[in-house]
Image (tube, rainbow, N blue to C red):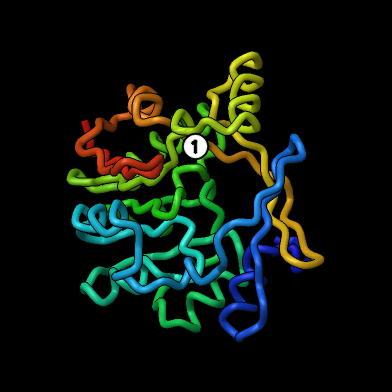
Amino acid sequence: MREQEDAYGRLLLDHLEGRPAQEIVERDDGFIAANQGPAAYFAPYGSWPSVERRAMRYVRGRVLDVGCGAGRAALRLQERGHELVAVDISPLAVEVARRRGVLDAREVPFERVDASLGIFDTVLMLGNNFGLVGSAGGARRALRRLHGLTSARGRVVAESNDPSRTDDPAHLGYQKRNRERGRLPGHLRLRVRHRELATPWFDYLIVSPADLEALADGTGWRPHRLIRDEGSLYVAVLEKA
């Protein structure tokens, strides 16, 4: 990733160094959202959403932390004694994670994670990071690939946002257009902006629990546990079929 494209990483670095920062997410239909401030990416375990804290109980063994960001999950797992590799596409995010104490943080896009990183017992995709699979086809390919990178007791602990739990006309209209194009309703095309920087456009997938289960079918994974509350956020724990 080129320096002028690393809007997300610069956002994290600015927050770490005490400069004002605000994450802006732009969708390809022109919808723009000012997300929660970057402090959430640095949040201590006690202030995480309850579904995330409950999901951490299912993390075991050697861990691959996908989309590590500022390292909040990696630091928590290190404290618990886990061996882990934390990966992110953003070079500045990796720098921030290292500066905060993550021992093994690497600049690796999710789609390039391979056997060179070793075998894992848990693949952690916290912070809505199941979305990094990009599309329905990308999800199936990613799950098959992760099957080969995990031990016999391997798990995927994946967080997503259920797109069916909205009544916002802007989101419902976007979902309708996706269905008309033969896509899952939560298939998003996004970019992140911060100050003068913008990431390249990328595909991002949010799915309902039922859609996630359907995507996992035939990939060697089966649903083991669903962790959710009354909101749209949830974590699915997949185990080897």
Q: In which quarter of the image is residue 179?
A: top right
- For the point 18% across and 46% down, the residue is 153
Give the number of marks: 1
Give the image quarter of residue 186.
Answer: top right
The reply, left or right, for residue 55 in relation to residue 38 is left
Look at 75% across and 61% down and name the residue there.
5
Question: Could you tell whether 6 is left or right of 103 in the image?
Answer: right
Please determine whether, in this image, residue 202 is positioned above or below residue 122.
above
- The residue identified by callout 1 is 206
**Label 1 secondary element:** loop
- Give the image location of residue 27, x and y in percent: 70, 41
- Quadrant the N terminus occupies: bottom right
Q: Quadrant of the C terminus?
A: top left
**Image coordinates for residue 201, horizontal then vertical, percent:** 72, 45
Quadrant in the picture for residue 146: top left
With 164 as the anchor, is 197 left or right in this view?
right
Q: Residue furthest right?
A: 196
Amino acid type at circle 1 is Ile
> Callout 1 environment at 10 Å: few (<14), some (14 to 19), or many (20+)?
many
Residue positioned 41% across, 82% down in the render: 101
- Where residue 55 appears, x then y in whole percent? 26, 52
Nearest the eye: 152 or 43: 43
Instruction: Write the residue at 54% across / 77% down.
Output: 96
